Image: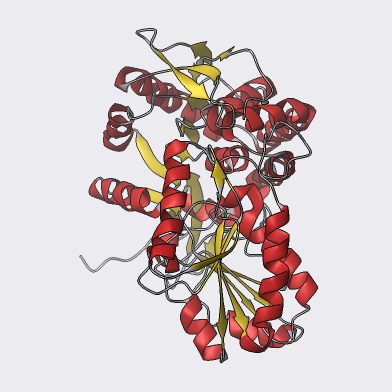
C-alpha cells in the first residue's frame, strides 16, 4: 500500500465559543490515514476543562438562538448546504485520507448531508404544537413545543460526514445549541468539518461547539457531558454495546438520549425475484464502504430453488471487487478503519471456517484491506451467524419456507433494516411486515436512506427516529392554558 497519495500533515484546532483553539495544555494526537498508515492530521487532545467551556458556551448561546426567528435560522441552514456543496471535492479527499471512504460513498454523503440541511431549514416553520380541546368551559389549551437547551452529540467514524451532520442538525433546527464530540477515528470528517461549515455559514458563536480528544481519552469528556446539569439530551450513533452504556448514564440523570446503533441486516430473495437485479442489489448492500455501515447486508437468505444460481453469480461478482487506495476515484472500496478492525474481521472469518464454514469468494487481506468475502455453511455456533461483523463479509444460505426465512431474519438481537426481493410486491410487503426491523425495503437494498425518512431501528439497534420525527426527541412539549372565565373551585 505504498502507492497511496502522499499528503502534507494538516493542523487542526477545535471550536469552542466561536473560537478555534488548541487543547489548553497544547497536547495533540495523530489522526491516521487508514490506507497508507501516514499521519493525516494533528488534532487537539482535550479533556474536561475544554468540554466544560464548550458546555458553558452552548448554554450561554441558547436563549438568543432559541429566540431567533424562523426566517433567519432557515437562511443559515441553506447557506451551510451551499458551502458544503462548494467544498465537495475537498471533502471527498479529506474523507478518503482520514476514514478510507471511496469516492462513491463520499459523494453520497455530501448529497445526503446537503439535502438534510435544506430540509431542516424548514423545521422552524413546522407546527410548533397543537390546540388541545379542554373539558373545562372557557379554557383554551395549547401544547407548545420548546427547545431543550444544550444537546451533546457523539458522532461515529463510519458515514462520518452524513452522520456528523445528522448528530447536530435536528437539535439545532429545533432551537437547541450543541456540543459535538466526534469519534477520535474521524475528528475532522465527523466533527471539525461541521464546525467549519456552520461557522462560515454564520451560526452565532457558541451555538455549535466541537471538542476533540485523543484515542482512549474519552473518559473526562464523557464524564462532564453526562454529569453536567446544563446538558439536557444526547444524540449518539455507534455500537450497541456503547449505546447501552450511554443510555444507562443518561437514565441515571433522567436525561433523554437518541440512539442509532448496530445492525445485522438480512436480505430475503424469493424464488420469483429478478436474479440479476437481486445480485446487483446484494453486491452493493453487502460491500459498499467495505461493509462498515450499520445498514450493510450481513446475511442473504435465498429460496432453495434459486440458491445455487444466485450464489454462483454473487460470488463471481464479489471476486471482481478489489479494495485499494480510496483517494483514487477508480477504486470503489478501500481499507478498514484501523488494524484492530481489520483483525476483528479476519478473526470472525477464521472462527467461522474453523467451525465448518466455507469461503466461496474472498477471504484474503493485505494490510487493512480485506477482500469482499462470501461464506456458506456457517454453523449457528459461529458468532458471525448472528453477530454484527463490521467488514466486507456476508453469509449466504438457503431456505425452504417463508416462515424459515422470517425466523432466520429475526434470529438476532438487532433490528435495523431488512430487504425482500420478489416480483410480487404485496407478498414482499406482507413478508416484510413479519420481520423485526425498523426499516424494510422491498426490491431495494438494506442500505440507503433519505433525509426525510423516519430512520431508526428496533431491539438492540436503538430507539428514536431521525428525519422530522427527531423534533419529538429534541424538544419538550409544554402545556399552556388560558381561562377566559373565572373558574369555580371546590375549596
- Rendering coords of residue 266 (x, y %): 55, 70
Query: Up-down: is 213 above or below 136?
Result: above
Horizontal placement of 328 versus 22: left or right?
Answer: right
- Rendering coords of residue 197 (x, y %): 65, 25
| Figure quadrant of the C terminus | bottom left
Foreground residue among 81 and 294:
294
Query: Up-down: is 150 above or below 409?
Result: above
Query: Up-down: is 261 above or below 208?
Result: below
Residue 11, quarter of picture: top right
Horizontal placement of 379 versus 115: left or right?
Answer: left
Query: Up-down: is 443 above or below 456?
Result: below
Foreground residue among 107 and 63:
107
Horizontal placement of 140 versus 426: left or right?
Answer: left
Q: Is residue 476 visible?
A: no
Which residue is situated farthest in the bottom direction here?
Answer: 401
Residue 425, quarter of picture: bottom right
Q: Is residue 42 visible?
A: yes
Foreground residue among 75 and 337:
337
Q: How many marks?
A: 0
| Residue at the (45%, 54%) spot, across then down | 261
Horizontal placement of 219 versus 200: left or right?
Answer: left
- Rendering coords of residue 348 (x, y %): 42, 56
| Residue at the (62%, 30%) spot, across then down | 1
- Rendering coords of residue 263 (x, y %): 49, 60
| Residue at the (72%, 73%) spot, across then down | 443
Amino acid at each position: 500500500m505504498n502507492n497511496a497519495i502522499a499528503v502534507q500533515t494538516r493542523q487542526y484546532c477545535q471550536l469552542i465559543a466561536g473560537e478555534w483553539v488548541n487543547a489548553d495544555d497544547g497536547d495533540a494526537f495523530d489522526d491516521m490515514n487508514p490506507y497508507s498508515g501516514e499521519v493525516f492530521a494533528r488534532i487537539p487532545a482535550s479533556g474536561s476543562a475544554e468540554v466544560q467551556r464548550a458546555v458553558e458556551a452552548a448554554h450561554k448561546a441558547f436563549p438568543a438562538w432559541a429566540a431567533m426567528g424562523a426566517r433567519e435560522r432557515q437562511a443559515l441552514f441553506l447557506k451551510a448546504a451551499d458551502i458544503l456543496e462548494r467544498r465537495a471535492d475537498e471533502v471527498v479527499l479529506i474523507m478518503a485520507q482520514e476514514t478510507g471512504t471511496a469516492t462513491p460513498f463520499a459523494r453520497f454523503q455530501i448529497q445526503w448531508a446537503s439535502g438534510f440541511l435544506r430540509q431542516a431549514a424548514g423545521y422552524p416553520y413546522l407546527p410548533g404544537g397543537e390546540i388541545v380541546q379542554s373539558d373545562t368551559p372557557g379554557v383554551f389549551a395549547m401544547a407548545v413545543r420548546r427547545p431543550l437547551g444544550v444537546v451533546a452529540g457523539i458522532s461515529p467514524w463510519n458515514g462520518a460526514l452524513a452522520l456528523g451532520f445528522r448528530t447536530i442538525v435536528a437539535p439545532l433546527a429545533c432551537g437547541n445549541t450543541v456540543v459535538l464530540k466526534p469519534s477520535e477515528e474521524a475528528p475532522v470528517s465527523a466533527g471539525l468539518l461541521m464546525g467549519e461549515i456552520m461557522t462560515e455559514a454564520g451560526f452565532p458563536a457558541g451555538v455549535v461547539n466541537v471538542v476533540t480528544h485523543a484515542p482512549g481519552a474519552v473518559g473526562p469528556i464523557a464524564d462532564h457531558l453526562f454529569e453536567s446539569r446544563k446538558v439536557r439530551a444526547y444524540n449518539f450513533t455507534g455500537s450497541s454495546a456503547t449505546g447501552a452504556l450511554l443510555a444507562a448514564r443518561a437514565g441515571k440523570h433522567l436525561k433523554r438520549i437518541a440512539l442509532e446503533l448496530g445492525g445485522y441486516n438480512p436480505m430475503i430473495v424469493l424464488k420469483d425475484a429478478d436474479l440479476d437485479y437481486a445480485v446487483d442489489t446484494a453486491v452493493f448492500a453487502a460491500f459498499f464502504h467495505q461493509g462498515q455501515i450499520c445498514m450493510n447486508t450481513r446475511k442473504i437468505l435465498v429460496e432453495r430453488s434459486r440458491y445455487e444460481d444466485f450464489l454462483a453469480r454473487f460470488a463471481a461478482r464479489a471476486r471482481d471487487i478489489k479494495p485499494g487506495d480510496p483517494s483514487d476515484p477508480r477504486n470503489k472500496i478501500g481499507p478498514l478503519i484501523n488494524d484492530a478492525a481489520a483483525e476483528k474481521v479476519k478473526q470472525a472469518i477464521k472462527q467461522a471456517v474453523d467451525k465448518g464454514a466455507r469461503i466461496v469468494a474472498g477471504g484474503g487481506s493485505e494490510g487493512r484491506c480485506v477482500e469482499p468475502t462470501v461464506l456458506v455453511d456457517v454453523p449457528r455456533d459461529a458468532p458471525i451467524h448472528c453477530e454484527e461483523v463490521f467488514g466486507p463479509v456476508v453469509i449466504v444460505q438457503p431456505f425452504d419456507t417463508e416462515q424459515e426465512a422470517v425466523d432466520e431474519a429475526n434470529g438476532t438481537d438487532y433490528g435495523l433494516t431488512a430487504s425482500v426481493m420478489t416480483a410480487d410486491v404485496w407478498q414482499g410487503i406482507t413478508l416484510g411486515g413479519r420481520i423485526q426491523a425498523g426499516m424494510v425495503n422491498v426490491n431495494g437494498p438494506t442500505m440507503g436512506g433519505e433525509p426525510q425518512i423516519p430512520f431508526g431501528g428496533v431491539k438492540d439497534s436503538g430507539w428514536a427516529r431521525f428525519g422530522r420525527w427527531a423534533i419529538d426527541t429534541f424538544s419538550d412539549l409544554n402545556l399552556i392554558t388560558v381561562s377566559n372565565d373565572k373558574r369555580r373551585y371546590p375549596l
